[in-house]
Image: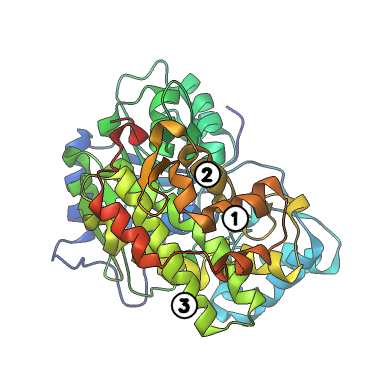
């Protein structure tokens, strides 16, 4: 089978990840998961990451760091497409990063891999994204070197016998790639487990309007049962997690898998909880990206005014609370995770970065929503999906001030404005400030009261 793979050994973190926070050794955690999968001696547990963006690469690199030395019991690989060139400016910056890190420099020299980075710096050769990923460099996160990874560029070779597949693809690519994967799984006897990291949604408007999430796309594309598909998300920034900043996350899905996987994924600096509410947490992961773009715009247009950003935060959180009441029967349970994820995304996420750069004129909408060095800006497609869903008259809610029923989007002026800026392209980024300063805009508290005092829950939106 055509493809490329490089075998590497893992390295332990300086503080030693040999002991987990609950007292189980790394090998004991692997053995527990192997038992659940029914693995025989000599048959390694095969874990494959699909997609090599920042979070997907970091997630696989953390597993490689923790378990890569147990090669007889677990095999960890990552797939990404071959052939994407690394431009000269990125190659020059990468060379600076390498030479600023003695440990990385020594590792490349020891592996006889340093010379190609010298040649790329001089313009004598072209590097490729899959090539540098083998050495631990993600093209979307050059400043944070990872451990060396086993990289496979042939999708069939990567996934055909995988026990656990990590979906690190953007939501906009998930369906197409997993439809291709399904062709390679037709002869499978065992059913794989899939952990999706994707934060994004699509809208399906007929016969009833509903949200389609990445785990639902995977289920439909592959036929893998819903109980074997999980979602992992949390308030985190990929580079900071790999640099062992303390973080937490939730793995959501069927109890059969989520509890054992939570123990397997947990590390001293990365605490993983488990939860049974898969789809709602997944949707919330997409929702906060919508408002992060607007936050970036407000920050840029007001020269980082703390007051203006707090006004925006009040209004965007009230809209998110309103939307969660449409989606969830018990929305209060989501308040903490949603606000935490929103907070970190507004502070340092790529969607807020995108909004800032748009407002400053440093990038434009003609460049699309896949930005070199950052990856896919998933908030753009999420703006379109949420706007289209919440515009449906079949979802109308009562507006007490107007004493009539209106589409839910009419109670979300920031979402409407972001749609006009990003999708319709009718107005410039400054429109977000005009929306905030509109004298007719209601107190954010009023929107929350409408959500809490009226029965607006629509279970059909999540296909329930």
How far apart are the two marked residues, 1 and 3, measured between alpha carbons? 18 Å
How far apart are the two marked residues, 1 and 2, measured between alpha carbons? 9 Å
> Height in image: 386 above or below 55?
above
Residue 142 in view here: no
Q: Is there a contact, CB below 8 Å, between mark 3 and mark 2?
A: no
- Horizontal relation, residue 260 to residue 195: left or right: left
The answer to which quarter of the image holds residue 278 is top left
- In the rendered structure, find residue 418 and report the number of the disc placed on it: 1
Q: Earlier in the sequence, mark 1 or mark 3?
A: 3
> Height in image: 212 above or below 100?
above
Quick one: label 1, few (<14), some, or many (20+) residues within 10 Å? many
Secondary structure beneath disc 2?
helix
Q: Nearer the viewer, residue 314 or 108?
A: 314
Write down the residue under mark 3. Answer: 310
The answer to which quarter of the image holds residue 294 is bottom right
Write down the residue under mark 2. Answer: 387
Residue 410 drawn at (x, y percent): 49, 48
Q: Earlier in the sequence, mark 1 or mark 2?
A: 2
Residue 346 drawn at (x, y percent): 49, 69
Query: Measuring 58% from the left and 34% from the top, which residue is drawn there?
Result: 154
Image quadrant occupied by the N terminus:
top right
Query: Measuring 69% from the left and 68% from the top, which residue is drawn there?
Result: 359
> Height in image: 278 above or below 360?
above
Q: Nearer the viewer, residue 42 or 245?
A: 245
- In the rendered structure, find residue 251 and report the number of the disc placed on it: none
Q: Nearer the viewer, residue 297 or 91?
A: 297
Query: Measuring 47% from the left and 38% from the top, which residue is drawn there?
Result: 389
Q: Is there a contact, CB below 8 Å, between mark 1 and mark 2?
A: yes
Residue 224 drawn at (x, y percent): 34, 26
Secondary structure beneath disc 3?
helix
- Horizontal relation, residue 65 to residue 89: left or right: left
């Amino acid at each position: 089978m055509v493809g490329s793979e490089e075998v590497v050994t893992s390295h332990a973190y300086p503080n030693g990840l040999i002991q987990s926070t609950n007292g189980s050794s790394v090998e004991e955690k692997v053995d527990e998961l192997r038992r659940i999968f029914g693995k025989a001696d000599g048959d390694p547990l095969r874990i494959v990451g699909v997609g090599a963006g920042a979070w997907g690469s970091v997630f696989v690199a953390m597993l490689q760091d923790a378990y890569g030395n147990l090669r007889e019991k677990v095999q960890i690989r990552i797939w990404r497409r071959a052939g994407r060139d690394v431009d000269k400016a990125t190659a020059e910056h990468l060379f600076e990063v390498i030479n600023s890190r003695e440990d990385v420099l020594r590792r490349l020299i020891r592996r006889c891999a340093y010379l190609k980075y010298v040649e790329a710096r001089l313009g004598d050769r072209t590097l490729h994204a899959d090539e540098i990923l083998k050495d631990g460099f993600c093209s979307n996160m050059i400043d944070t070197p990872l451990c060396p990874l086993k990289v496979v560029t042939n999708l069939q070779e990567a996934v055909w016998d995988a026990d656990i597949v990590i979906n690190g693809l953007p939501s906009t690519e998930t369906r197409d790639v997993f439809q291709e994967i399904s062709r390679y799984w037709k002869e499978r006897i065992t059913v794989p487990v899939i952990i999706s990291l994707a934060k994004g949604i699509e809208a399906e408007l007929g016969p009833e309007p509903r949200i389609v999430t990445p785990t639902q796309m995977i289920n439909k594309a592959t036929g893998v049962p819903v109980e074997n598909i999980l979602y992992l998300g949390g308030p985190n920034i990929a580079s900071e997690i790999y640099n062992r900043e303390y973080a937490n996350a939730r793995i959501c899905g069927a109890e059969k898998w989520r509890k054992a996987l939570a123990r397997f994924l947990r590390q001293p600096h990365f605490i993983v909880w488990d939860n049974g509410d898969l789809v709602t947490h997944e949707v919330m992961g997409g929702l906060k990206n919508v408002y992060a773009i607007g936050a970036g715009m407000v920050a840029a247009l007001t020269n980082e005014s703390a007051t203006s950003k707090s006004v925006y935060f009040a209004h965007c959180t009230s809209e998110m609370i309103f939307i969660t009441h449409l989606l969830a029967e018990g929305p209060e349970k989501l308040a903490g995770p949603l606000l935490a994820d929103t907070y970190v995304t507004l502070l340092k996420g790529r969607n807020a970065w995108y909004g800032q750069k748009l407002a400053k004129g440093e990038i434009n909408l003609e460049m699309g929503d896949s930005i070199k060095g950052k990856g896919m800006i998933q908030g753009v497609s999420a703006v379109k999906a949420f706007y289209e869903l919440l515009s449906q008259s079949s979802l109308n809610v009562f507006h007490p001030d107007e004493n009539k029923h209106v589409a839910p989007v009419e109670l979300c002026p920031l979402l409407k404005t972001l749609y006009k800026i990003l999708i319709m392209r009718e107005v410039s980024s400054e429109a977000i400030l005009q929306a905030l300063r509109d004298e007719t805009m209601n107190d954010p508290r009023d929107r929350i009261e409408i959500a809490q005092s009226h029965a607006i829950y629509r279970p059909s939106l999540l296909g329930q």
